[in-house]
Amino acid sequence: MNTKVVLKLAVASLAASAFGAAIAAPLTVASYDMLNGNTGSYNYWDDTYSGTGAIGTNNAPLSGGKGDLTDGVVANNNWFVTEAPVGPGPYVGWTIDPTIHFHFGGLVNIQKVSFNFDDSNGAGGVSAPRSVQIAGTTYGVADPSGDAPFQFDVVGLNLNVADLQIAIQRANAWVFISEISFDGQRGGVLPEPGALSLLALGMIGLAFAKRR
Ligand SMILES: [Ca+2]
Ligand SMILES: [Ca+2]
Ligand SMILES: [Ca+2]
């Protein structure tokens, strides 16, 4: 392979890497494990959970399935609207600080995690949480001044994982979540800045070699 072709391939590879970094797309969750929600005025369980565990029991261990948190349904109203009358509702609500283990069924690069929380400004003990912890790093959640459900995004993560642990720290008696979603890239690992520098150095080297 002559120098010119190698250089062209290197440029194409660099361009593809840079492009890849820009096209984070929704990632499908294979399954998640956690403790089920709790009962208050209504039952705030993971009603659609597909895996093992008692979906009608407070804080029962659930594993190997998916449910309310990843079904694409985002609650646009407060818990006292969408969970009444008693029956399956879109939220999972806890009186514990929940820890959720997400499994992606293979390596993914995660750029963004989005949480859909309820925030009834303390009505019924439901408030925005204090913080979320993603793979051991804590991100503070600012409580919006209003009382509408809201989305909280953590961006720029660049996590290369097959499984991810997320923990939620409450600020009040309850935390309510209707959806957790992920943006990133399946399989392909986005290059580290160091790797890009090496590639750039290689290209400079090739350019010099070509001149000689
Ligand atoms: Ca949902
Ligand atoms: Ca539910
Ligand atoms: Ca608020």
Image (spheres, rainbow, N blue to C red):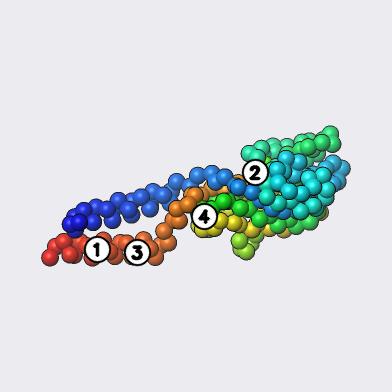
Q: Earlier in the sequence, mark 1 or mark 3?
A: 3
Q: Residue furthest left?
A: 212
Residue linked to disc 4:
107
Give the amino acid type for the residue marked by disc 1 in the picture: Ile
Mark 3: amino acid: Ser
Residue indicated by mark 1:
204
- Name the residue at the right extreme: 41
Q: Residues within 10 Å of mark 3 (few under 14, many from 20)?
A: few
SS at circle 4: strand
Respond yes or no on whether mark 2 lies under 8 Å from ligand 1. yes
In the picture provided, is 16 more to the left or to the right than 56? left
- Camera-near label (4 vs 2) is 4
Report whether the residue tagged 3 is closer than 8 Å to ligand 1.
Answer: no
Q: CA distance from mark 4 to mark 3?
A: 24 Å
Q: CA distance from mark 2 to mark 3?
A: 37 Å
Q: Earlier in the sequence, mark 2 or mark 3?
A: 2
